[in-house]
Amino acid sequence: MIYIVLAVVITIITAGLIIFLNLSNKQKKDYIRINTAEEAINASLDERLNLLKEIEQIINNSTELNQNNFKSLNIDELDSFEFDRKLSKITELFNKIRSDYEVELDKEDFRDLMTKLKINEEKNEASKSYYNKYAEDLNSRISSFPANIIAKISGTDKKEMFDINKFKQVKTDIVVESKI
C-alpha cells in the first residue's frame, strides 16, 4: 500500500514538474521572441531618427521653414513606445510639409529619403506586429493558472502592447518655426 501511495506522489510530482518546465519554456520562448522584436524595433527607430534628421536638413535648406524637432528630444529618457510616438508625429509633420512645399522639395535626395522612410516604417510596423503577437500570447498565458504561479516564481511580468491608435489622440509637441 505504501508503495502505491509513494508511486502516486512521485507521479504527481513528476507531472507537476513537467507542466512547470513546459510552461516555463513557453514563457521563455515568448520572451526571446519579444526581445528579438524589441531589438528590431529599436534598430528601426534609430534608423528612422537618422532619416528624419536628414529630411529635416533638406527641408530647412529648401524652404523658409526652420525645423528644429530634435533639439529637445532626449532619446535616452524615452522608452520605445514614446520614442516611436514622437518620431511618428515628426513624420506626420514632414509629410504635411512635403505636400505644402512640393516644388521646393522636388529633389532626388529628398524623394530617396522619403522612400527609405516609408520602407523603414513598414519594417517597424511588421516588427511591432510580431512583438504584439508574442506579447499578447505571453500576457494571456501568464494570466491563467498555473502559468500565473510560474510567472510569479520566475519574475515574468506582462508586456505592454504597441498601439498606435491610442497615440494619435495625444497632442503633438512639435513646433514649426519660420526663417522669416
Image (tube, rainbow, N blue to C red):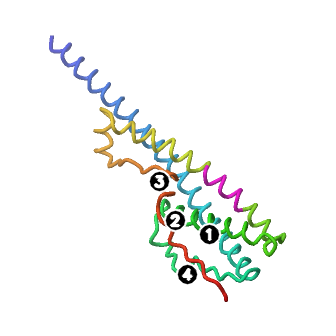
Q: CA distance from mark 3 to mark 4?
A: 25 Å
Location of residue 115 in the rendering, given as x and y in whole percent from the top left corner: 76, 61
- Neighbor class of circle 2 (other Cα within 10 Å; few <14, some 14-19, many 20+) is many
Residue 71 shows which numbered tag? 4
Where residue 114 appears, x then y in whole percent?
74, 64
In-front residue for pair 123/21:
123
Left or right of residue 108, residue 36 in this image? left
User: Magenta span: helix, strand or loop, mainly?
Assistant: helix
Q: Which residues are magenta?
A: 117-125
Check residue 124 for magenta coloring: yes
Tell which circle, 4 or 2, labels the residue nearer the N-terminal end: 4
From the viewer's side, name the closer residue of 147 and 58: 58
Q: Are marks 3 and 4 in contact (CB under 8 Å)?
A: no
Say few, some or many: other residues with alpha carbon within 10 Å of mark 1 (under 14 / 14 to 19 / 20 or more).
many
Which is nearer the N-term, disc 1 or disc 4? 1
Circle 2 SS class: helix
Q: Nearer the viewer, residue 32 or 46?
A: 46
Q: Position of residue 85 (x, y in %)?
A: 52, 62
The answer to whether the residues at label 2 and label 1 have Cβ atoms under 8 Å apart is no
Kind of residue sitting beneath label 1: Leu
The residue labelled by disc 2 is 83
Does dot 3 land on a helix, a strand or a loop?
helix
Whole-number angstrom distance, CA of label 4 to CA of label 2:
14 Å
